[in-house]
Image: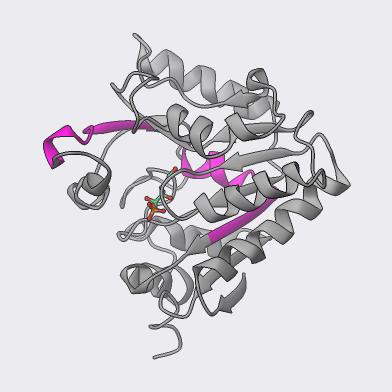
Amino acid sequence: MQIIIVENKEKVSLEAFNIVKNIILKNNQAVLGLATGSTPIGLYKLLIDSFKKEQLSFKDVTTCNLDEYVGLDRNHPQCYYHFMKEHLFDHIDISLENTFIPNGMAEDLEKECKHYEDVLNQHQVDVQILGVGSNGHIGFNEPMTPFDSITHVIELAQQTREDNARFFDAIEDVPTHAITMGISSILRAKKIILMATSEYKAQAIQQMIEGPVDLKCPASILQTHPDVVVIVDKDAARMLGNG
Ligand code: F6R
């Protein structure tokens, strides 16, 4: 694991941007694994800026998102399909048919999971962007999710629903379930960038980097991947190296 500690969240976004930009410049057909939530928004803004300055094109890029809430319509402002359009896809030259997000409204969710895993098998991710939950989740793989899991339906942890309640009117509105890439699906990416900012993530970051590889902290499995870059601000790195 390469650990990069920077001053603030703007610099976290910039470090991640530089890596992603170089991957796209080297391979205009790159496959990007994308995350939602507040952490990657700064990275997506930088990607949009560089498209507008004609430095990057996404015409032949493919994207695969990590996860989607179950039961939110694609027009719902908090569904991840909507999030991706709002924060990235609507502002760049990507072809929507090259963007993949699990369908949380599918009638047969098991079939949808299988279908999404097939999509992932057909598009090996060149670089996977990850945030991390305060409980150490990656994607929506909550603590105790098996490390060999593939795309599946998960019941969201109470902690996750509380953390994400900030995006909804009330905690009761936060979906109880999501479809998520599994941990082994995530680990198939050639390169992984995990970003985290704020003191709220400090414990998860400490356990992920310095703790044992343990189901209680799903992100700790990243210690076993050959090419992981962790980019954190000072606050998220606060508990590192304390023994
Ligand atoms: C989002 C995702 C989650 C988030 C994590 C952190 O697609 O898979 O693992 O990355 O919950 O969320 P934020 O960035 O909002 O703190």
- Which residue is painted at 59% across and 70% down in the image? 11
Query: Looking at the image, is 159 positioned above or below residue 203?
Result: above
- Which residue is painted at 79% across and 44% down in the image? 56
Q: Does residue 111 appear left or right of residue 17 in this picture?
A: left
Residue 62 in the image: x percent, y percent? 70, 31
185 part of magenta stretch: yes
- Which residue is painted at 53% across and 43% down in the image? 184
Q: Can residue 167 be seen in this view?
A: yes
Indicate the colouring scheme: one colour
Residue extending farthest to the bottom is 242
177 part of magenta stretch: yes
Residue 47 in the image: x percent, y percent? 67, 48
Q: Can residue 157 be seen in this view?
A: no
Residue 207 in the image: x percent, y percent? 39, 71
Q: Does residue 179 appear left or right of residue 230 in this picture?
A: left
Query: Looking at the image, is 123 positioned above or below residue 115?
Result: below
Tell me which segment is drawn in magenta: 171-194
Residue 20 in the image: x percent, y percent? 71, 52
- Which residue is painted at 66% across and 44% down in the image? 48
Number of marks in the rendered image: 0
Can you say which quadrant of the picture contains the N terminus?
A: bottom right
Can you say which quadrant of the picture contains the C terminus?
A: bottom left
Residue extending farthest to the right is 26
Frontmost residue, 149 versus 124: 124
Specify the quadrant of the image occupied by residue 153. top left
Specify the quadrant of the image occupied by residue 92. top right
